[in-house]
Amino acid sequence: MASKDQSIRLAAFTQCARLMQEYSGTVPWAAISQGFDFEGERVYLGSRPRGIHRPTQMTCGVLSIKTNQPRQGRSARYDDALSGDGYFVYAFQGTDAANRDNTCLREAFDDQTPLAYFYGISPAVYQILFPCYVTEWQPTLLSCMVAVGSPYEMNQREPDPPAYRIDRRYSTIEAKVRLHQAEFRELVLTAYGRRCAISGLPIPGLLEAAHIVPDRDERGHPEVSNGLCLSTLHHAAYDRNLLGIDPDGVVHIPAAVLAQKDGPTLEKAIKAFNGARIFLPHHPYDRPNQDYLAERFDAFRQAS
């Protein structure tokens, strides 16, 4: 591995981590595409038209690969790449396994050099996975397998893929779970205009996608109609039945909570919303499933 290439990769991963922190996980392509400065030059993290990217400053392998959201939709897609407990399947660029892009990717496989994976969870919004490794090369299928590794691997001078196989498998499964969660969150926050449905709080870093029917339930699919955009405070209260929402979208606070006397957080952030109506998404098909709300509200009443 060329030392300059390695330095560029490490700088790129640092930039990716910064972007993930700045944007609370999911990152818009507009931010990714700006790249970063390295030794007086601009290095670009990825390419809009191409999924396999090696910047001009690098001599071998690739810096990143990209998968776009394949279709518009209001539900998480459950595509093949996220199914099962195996690695990601990544399709080659075009139909020639020996073209320039695929040859660069083959070099990353041969050298086991790390790369970043920009996985599209909605149009122009990505979850960044790194470090990732090409683990299997399948030219007859025009695809390869990609695993998520650990930062520890990047510090080894002579990577030994078999030694990391179990760790990569667990890391990849965990990454797929995070992608499902991130996709659901992005869809719900977008539907609600990135505001809490109860308080109207507009700070994305403090907003979460709350399930109405819990995801442990077989009906608890990550669909917008089974979600509510709530602040971290109201999400926690909703999950613990300290706050309920009836099928008409009216907020209910238990009598025991209303009877408590405390400072402004309790009074203004919880008790003040008793009897208020939640904000609803603009599109009717994004609005909460009333049957789900009714079922969840029954559980709230029994608990309180």
Image (cartoon, helix red, strand yellow):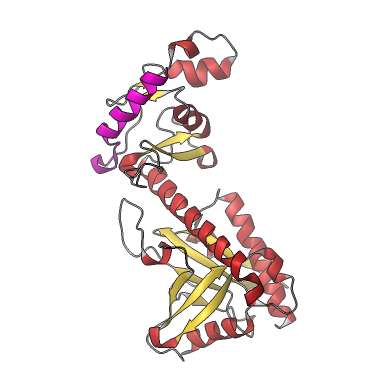
Q: Quadrant of residue 95?
A: bottom left
From the viewer's perspective, tell me whether residue 149 is left or right of residue 238: right
Q: Establish if 124 lies above or below 44.
A: above
From the viewer's perspective, tell me whether residue 9 is left or right of residue 133: right
Residue closer to the observer: 49 or 64 = 64
Q: Position of residue 124 (x, y in %)?
A: 43, 60
Segment tinted magenta in the rendering: 281-304
Q: Establish if 69 lies above or below 194.
A: below
Quadrant containing the C terminus is top left
Report if residue 299 is visible in the image. yes
Query: Is 285 part of what is drawn in magenta?
Result: yes
Q: Position of residue 23 (x, y in %)?
A: 55, 50
Q: Establish if 199 lies above or below 162.
A: above
Q: Residue at x 63, y 76 (%)?
A: 161
Quadrant containing the N terminus is bottom right
Report if residue 131 is visible in the image. no
Query: Is 211 part of what is drawn in magenta?
Result: no
Q: Position of residue 255 (x, y in %)?
A: 44, 11
Q: Residue at x 49, y 88 (%)?
A: 100
Residue furthest to the bottom in view is 98
Magenta span dominant secondary structure: helix
Q: Residue at x 42, y 52 (%)?
A: 183
Q: How many marks?
A: 0
Q: Establish if 256 lies above or below 282.
A: above
From the viewer's perspective, tell me whether residue 4 is left or right of residue 191: right
Q: Position of residue 266 (x, y in %)?
A: 54, 17
